[in-house]
Image (spheres, helix red, strand yellow):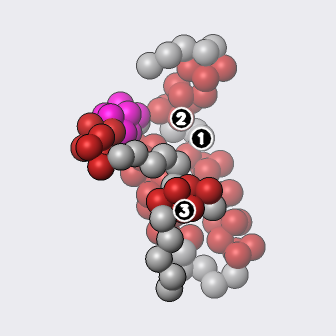
Amino acid sequence: GELITAEKAQAYGLLNTVVPPNLLESEAVKLAEQIASKSNFGIRLGKNMFYEQLKYENLDDAYDFATERIACNLQHPDAKHGIDDFVNKKNK
C-alpha cells in the first residue's frame, strides 16, 4: 500500500485526531482515561462484537448479527444507566 500522512488519513476519516509528537503521550493518556471511565461491560462487548462480525462473509449477515447483539445488550443495567444519563444529560 501507499503511505499517507496522518493529516490525509484524518481527512479520509481513518483517524479522529492528529497530534504533534510532543503531545502524543499526554493525549494517549487522556484517551485511555476517557475509555477507562466507561462501562467495562460495554467496552468488552463492543470489542467482542466487532471481532465476531468480522467472521461473516456477507455484510448483511454481519449487520444482522450486530443488530441482534446490540438489542440484547441494551437490556444490561450498564446500558440502561448510560441511556438514562444521556437522556437526562448527566455528565460522568
> What segment is highlighted magenta in the picture?
28-38
Return the residue at label 3: 9
Residue highlighted by disc 2: 79
Label 2: element kind: helix
Label 1 – label 3 distance at C-alpha: 33 Å
Q: Which residue does the image show at 47% across and 32% down from the upper left? A: 78
| Circle 3: element type | helix
Quarter of image, res 9: bottom right
Q: Earlier in the sequence, mark 1 or mark 3?
A: 3
- Rendered location of residue 39, percent (x, y): 40, 36
Distance from disc 3 to disc 2, alpha carbons, whole Å, reads 32 Å
Q: Does the magenta-highlighted stretch encompass residue 14?
A: no
Q: What type is the residue that disc 2 sits on?
A: Ala
Task: Give the CA distance from mark 1 to mark 2.
Answer: 5 Å
Q: Which residue is mark 1?
A: 74
Residue 13 at least partly seen: no
Residue at x 53% of width, y 35% of height: 79
Question: Which residue is found at the position 48% from the left and 65% from the top?
Answer: 5
| Residue type (three-letter) at the residue carrying disc 3 | Ala
